Image: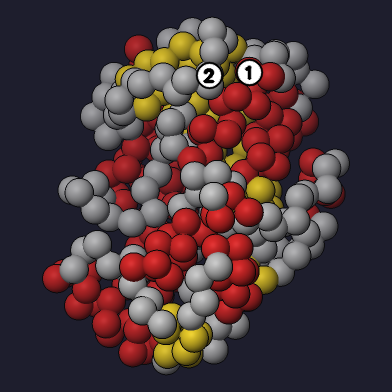
Amino acid sequence: MLGSMKTAVVGATGFVGSHLVPHLVASGHEVIAISRSGRRRPEWGDGVEARSADVVDGDLDTALAGAEAVVHLAAIPRESGGRRFDEVNVVGTQRVVDAAQRIGVRRLVHLSVLGVADDPKLAYLYSKWRGEESVRASGLDWVVLRPSLMFGTGDGFFNLVKTTLRWWSPGVVAIPGDGGARFQPLSVDDLAIAVEKSLTDHDRSRAVYELGGPAYLTYRQIIDEVMRVTGMRRLAVGVPIPLISALTAVTDRLLPIFPVSHDQIASLQRPNYTELDAFERSFGVEPRPLDLSYLGA
């Protein structure tokens, strides 16, 4: 077991970073918080040094200078605003790996996702797979974490469901297929525990962990739970996946603010769950059950 260390978190101001950085500080680590803007979050305190660097074209050697370990979180789940999977999720990851090796960092914890696929037809999952390949081919003491959907204040997926219900579902909400796609939601605060243990436990070197929460939920059950906590009632109607796929192929081009992309619909065919005891078996902590009460605020 390694002691506290100076850890650079790349992508520190995003959803996961906003939960991870305070956890690392509370666990006794010094943190270099790296983001494109270099901004500080008010809750960070004095134990955090904010630095700016873009994984696509920034000076990562300078941004990572002084770090003993790196946590790489920076990624995009959907292409928008000129940001592309290849440059951020693939090349960006490779640049972080290369910079870490150049400046002598040994430990790297890389955040991936469940369902990564060596399949170019699934653009996001393929980009995450290729990013993983950069990590796994490196000479670093790496750990790869593949969580299912993550929930917590500021999350992407569950807040997107809430937004879809509020603005895109007047009385009716479309469910892809029969709504049976299965997920295993994991608390972002439990993921922070896994990251910290991956940093400090030397025996975890060069390991891949697939992680989920304590229960499986279908897409339809998730919609029902978001409606329950927000008080927004809608009629859930199953729509054939080929039809939704055809619709999103059009909206990707003509209506980029549409809440779901063509690639995200295609990705539903990939499993997004693992064994129910995977988290506790790997990290010795029983993961928290799904709690979306923050969506009702």
Provide residue 72's location: percent of width, then percent of height: 49, 33
**Mark 2 crowd level (few <14, some 14–19, many ≥20, 10 Å Cα):** some
Quick one: quadrant of the N terminus? top right
Query: Looking at this view, is 60 or 273 the one in front?
Result: 273
Q: Quadrant of residue 7?
A: top right
Q: Residue at x 34, y 37 (%)?
A: 92
Work out whether mark 1 precedes mark 2 in sequence or the reverse, and give the earlier one: 1
Q: Is residue 150 left or right of residue 103?
A: right
- Mark 1 residue element: helix
Mark 1 or 2: in front is: 2
Q: Quadrant of residue 262?
A: bottom left
Amino acid tagged 2: Trp
Q: Residue at x 61, y 69 (%)?
A: 228
Q: Is residue 145 at least partly visible in the picture?
A: no
Provide residue 38's location: percent of width, then percent of height: 34, 20
Mark seen at residue 44:
2
Amino acid tagged 1: Val
Mark seen at residue 25:
1
Provide residue 171's location: percent of width, then percent of height: 41, 82
Could you tell me if the residues under marks 1 and 2 are in contact, i.e. CB atoms within 8 Å?
yes
Query: Looking at this view, is 25 or 67 the one in front?
Result: 25
Q: Is residue 68 above or below residue 187?
A: above
